[in-house]
Amino acid sequence: MALHPILSSLRRHKLAALLIVLEIAVACAILCNAVFVIRERLQRMQVTTGVAEHELVWIKTDGIDGDDAGARLERNLAALRGLAGVRSAALAFPLPLANTSMNFNPELDAAGTKHGPNIGMYLGSPGYLDTLGVKRVAGRDFAAAEYDAMDSWQPRSPAMLVTRALAARLWPGQDPLGQAFWVGGRRYAVIGVVDHLVRGDLRGSASEYAVMMAARPNRLFSGLYVLRVDPAARGRIVREAADTLLRLNPTMLVNDKGTYAELRAAYFRQDRAMAWLLAAVCAGLLAITALGIVGLTSFWVSQRSRQIGIRRALGATRGDILRYFQLENLLLVGAGIAAGMLLAYALNLLLMKHYELPRLPLSYLPVGALALWLLGQLAVLGPALRAAAVPPVVATRSV
Amino acid sequence: MFGYYFGLALRSLRRTPVLTALMVLAIGMGIGACITTLTVLRVLSGDPLPGRSGRLYYPQLDPTGRRNTEPEALMTYLDAANLWREHRADRQAIVVSANVKVFGPQPGARPQGVSTVATTADFFPMFGVPFAHGAAWSADEDRDKARVAVISAALNDRLFGGADSVGRSIRLDRWDFRIVGVLGAWHPQPRFYDLLGAGAFAGGDDVFIPFATSRDLAELGIQGAGVDCWGQLTDEVHLENQPCLWLQYWVELDTPARAAAYRDYLRRYAMQQKALGRYTHAHVALRDLMEWLAYNQVVPADVRLQAWLAFGFLLVCLLNTVGLLLARFLRRRGEIGVRRALGASRLDVFGQLLVESGTVGLAGGGLGLLLALAGLWAVRHSPSDYARLAQLDATMLGVTFALAVCASLLAGLLPAWRACQVPPALQLKVN
């Protein structure tokens, strides 16, 4: 079909045509970026924490004071292990994505002249690697003797496990086992490597810069109980574990408790809310744009019904009329998309500057274009069919 | 004339219900999205102490030198104690908070964990804190490390059934404190004075005790939420002489001249510390309350992004409305031609069409209000920290309709201008 009649007719409706093009351009720019942000958020929410997420429950208390704290903590742990459905129990700190963390910058030589990246520290009582369910890929677990009582925030035991990510960062291309760094002059050496373990909060590429160290429970390390349990009984065990601790310790405070799944969901609640909101806005944008196209095309159809009748009388088929409006829409939406791509890119640059968003992948552009083209064709179908239904006899009627 | 045009507009809108509904829907959705996000933005970026915030400042020093250009956000004990002793501000307060175990008067009752603020006596007059019973402790009690406490109305209700509890005692962990004051309702939002502790949108604080007392009883553990140490620790309970940042410091400076003088004083203090070899850099800052909130990005980036997105959405809705109005007005060329031929000036026609657009806007505003109420309801039931604050107030109600009418008038300008270009004779001829 020739483009000429379409173009010349659009020239006579410059303003209306321009409005459609503009609307589609802005919608396209917002859509591409919104979908990009949604995907960013969803990807963030996919993070592998490295722990047995569906089997963990936790009780956060205000800790235990006094010189007999160690014995009382052991008694608490023993009572928790006695609950039906509990496979193991340990004290640990922190949990991945718990929004609390203990961080340090290691010294990379004994003299303390060279500092490494910021690293998150995990502490745990005997057996906590198994309780958390982290997967070891090299080396060994802590020996019983390596769990030593703490006298400051730094464990006295020199043994540590590191994540694969941290090993690759600190000792690229080398065997991490036996490597060491120093913290405040104390030397810590790698005895094992774990596959994945995310820190207390996500920090981009440094999210897995974590070490696991060993400590025996005492008053400095007494706050957070972690239990690995039968997944089906998680809810019951959270309640029973808290009740057990409160019963055994009359002045203890249980500050918070829950399953690990809840903790993880809480960490991402903002991302989830944002993704939903963006999705809602996208749906609204698509709906409004489609309705706009329907409205304007309907207007054109009714305005041109006489011309349509004349064309029909001169031998144009229904299909010709239908295709005319479809092609016209294709052109308009195409122009809108072309402008929209540039606008999407400009908007992305703005977002990169102000909201730390990465660059929009070019692959989003054709996908967005296709979606809008489809939307345009769907929206124009109704009015175009109505136009095709205009009988040739209209040509003979005066308005 | 306005009333007549309004009547005409209603009649003409009724004639094309589908097109009218489309326009109202478009404006309503755009306005609803904007008002929802603007309300949240407004609540979050509000002034917690209107009338007072301009005189409150947050001084910053740089004992670590690790950030190169910026002073630190928190303060060391040594610096806070120095500034406190030299007392160059009209009022000043050290602030640090923690969750502390509190035992009520009933024997054998389980303790409660309550948010406890260790501060100095000026805190209360400086931030305009109202008292229901009693009063703040005195500067002498600050110095004497007195075991006195001010409690919130909420805690007073829980522990003492709302009675005047001044003179009675509560136990914080292992120590008894005498209650000297009970607060009235006081919930500044955002919770500006402890941004770096429990956070901007944390629940209320229930107990306030003298800072010196909290150091005397260091095992209470009131050290704030983000103790930040840049050197080797030798003691984690008594942070007084440790290389750690953990305190927040507020000053009241009643005139801009006093603020300028205090800034100079901070600079001199930093230079002096540098000369003593304690500091490597002499960066200082003195932000007022609102600047401090902005510096700490109290308004989440997501919320600002949402507001921009809503305005983008409104723009698309408006473009849509412009198109539909254009279609609508041009379809009525005949009618306009007749009016023009009968003596209506271009301005008359223009006015009439704008009134029609404004009417659409008004209806869109109504729909937008309903959508915004629904949106805010959804925000309130979302799990964010600030959820409970998302309420529409009278101002935003006004803004809703003002924005809707302005937006629709703006959308109507171009179509109305195009429509009133119609030469009367031509239209009559065509028809």
Image (cartoon, coloured by chain):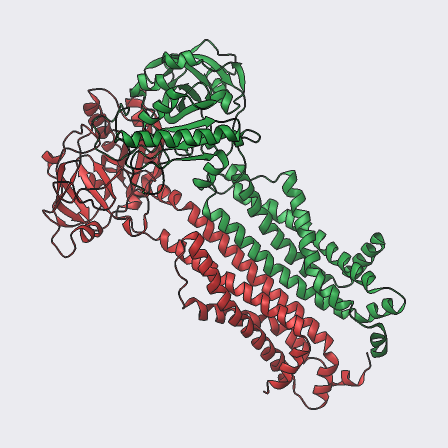
Chain colours: A red, B green
Q: Is residue A293 above or below residue A178?
A: below
* Residue A11 placement: quadrant: bottom right
Q: Nearer the viewer, residue A253 or B402?
A: B402
- Residue at image coords 52%, 37%: B388
* Residue B37 visible in the shown view: yes
Q: Which residue lies furthest to the right in this view?
A: B342
* Residue B111 visible in the shown view: no
- Residue at image coords 31%, 37%: B281
Please give left or right for residue A136 compared with residue A43 in the image.
left
Q: How many marks?
A: 0
Looking at the figure, which quarter contains the N terminus of chain B? bottom right
Locate residue B59, reporting x and y percent. 41, 31
Please give left or right for residue A209 compared with residue B326 in the image.
left
Please give left or right for residue A381 compared with residue B335 in the image.
left
Please give left or right for residue A151 compared with residue A277 in the image.
left
Locate residue A386, reporting x and y percent. 68, 76
Looking at the figure, which quarter contains the C terminus of chain B? bottom right
Q: Which residue lies furthest to the top in this view?
A: B167
Locate residue A51, reporting x and y percent. 26, 46
- Residue at image coords 41%, 11%: B140
Q: Nearer the viewer, residue A387 or A339?
A: A339
* Residue B351 placement: quadrant: bottom right
Q: Is residue B161 above or below residue B398?
A: above
Locate residue B402, reporting x and y percent. 68, 48
Q: Is residue A183 above or below residue A299?
A: above
